[in-house]
Image (tube, helix red, strand yellow):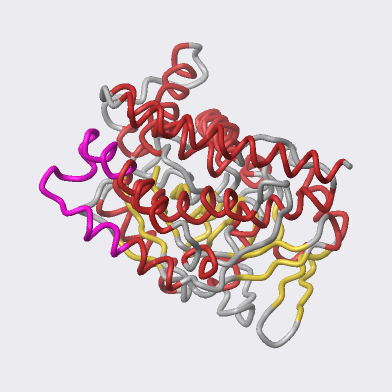
Amino acid sequence: MAFIIEGSVGILPAGALGVSLFYYLTAKLTQLDGLVYFIERRNSPSSQVLRSSGKITIATQEKIKSIPTEEILKPDLLTCYQSGFLPEVLLICPNPDQLLSIVTTVVELLVQISEQGELLQSAMPLPLLVLCSNGIYFQRFRQIFIEKIEEATLFGRLPDLWPDIMPQIVSRFLRGVTIQTGVREGNGAETIYRPGPRGRTQIAGGDNTTRERCRQILAGRGGWFELAPNISPTRLEFDKALVNLTCNLLGQLLAIDSQGRFKTLTVEQILESSYENEIRELAHQVFEVGQMVKVYKLEEDFEVILDQLMEVRRAHASHIPSSLQWVDMKLRLGTLEPEMTPTEAWLVEPLIRYAKASGLEDTANYFEKLKGELIDKLTLAKNRSST
């Protein structure tokens, strides 16, 4: 029989964001009590590299510390269940394009829980699932989650869970929109993670009980986690999209010149650039789409939204946006391809889809054009690195 370890937090996987969250949930690595740990993404090559290296290296303000993986790295979610334990909270932090496989794994976990006769118990051994990756996707993935459960029911792998059990399961599907930053340096066994300043994560989705329990556990361990009970997860995603797009997407356009030369830039350098008009235009286009899909009210003032965006950006002035870190790493490895990172793809593509569905053809064309400009710049950078 498997059980939930009360107060425990699993972080899936050990990437830049996950390590930063781990750093603050362990009081800057001073409370390694076994209740906060990483969980491998199923069939992940990077997890295999971490396990074979025997350590996860994290740079603190004072020193660089290597922690043995045997102390803080657990196997994948299904193996954890088979071993008899699961975390109470699971922070899911992969690239957005890896979320689908994790949702699939969670449904497989439900099937195994059902096979062991534990699904219908009052204390169902299913963690609170908090999706923390950047992107506009929560409504879509919650629907996919439900559809995959229904499909498993159709094929007899799960019993009919309506009307009692399904709401309990879906209530554990939460969104954590975070401004926590972190940097990954190097590759493979030589990777060093550098957590950014302590950043806020807002919890939405689910129901009041699960949100509060989640916040209680995470904030109780020193993390900066707050409830957003009266704000939809999609509203939070749009707010964060404003930050991501103006830092990461416009940052890449600014960081790669017309000859394909690339230089890393901080958020402050992007703010101080001549891109002020571009920042305003991009933010306004996102705001208009948000109004059409009812995440922003028609009477809301765009200038207030823009001021809030600039305030968040100024608070992270010294941070190098993650997509610029990604381009820099790919150039050094010689593996850069002219395509959007998952972060941009899971922001721009939903915005294009929402704009078209709302009849905002000019807005859809704007984002298509922005996407094309980014790919052109990445092509220049790739070609220059190849010569």
Q: Nearer the viewer, residue 178 or 102?
A: 178
Q: Position of residue 184 (x, y in %)?
A: 70, 61
Q: For residue 288, which quarter of the picture?
A: top left
Residue at the spot 71% in from the left edge and 76% down from the top edge = 59
Report the magenta residues as a range.
286-308
Residue 63 lies, with reference to residue 264, above or below; the image says: below
The residue positioned farthest toward the top in the image shown = 155
**Residue found 60% across the figure and 46% down from its top:** 94
| Residue 112 at x, y percent in the picture | 57, 32
Q: Would you say the magenta stretch is mainly helix, strand or loop? A: helix
Q: Residue 296: image x %, image y %? A: 21, 45
Is residue 252 located in the magenta-colored stretch of the structure? no
Residue 74 is at least partly visible in this image = yes
Q: Residue at x 76, y 79 (%)?
A: 64
**Relative to 40, does residue 110 appear above or below in the rendering?**
above
149, 196: nearer the viewer: 196
Above/below status of 166 relative to 209? above
Nearer to us in this view, 282 or 5? 282
Looking at the image, the residue that sits furthest to the bottom is 62
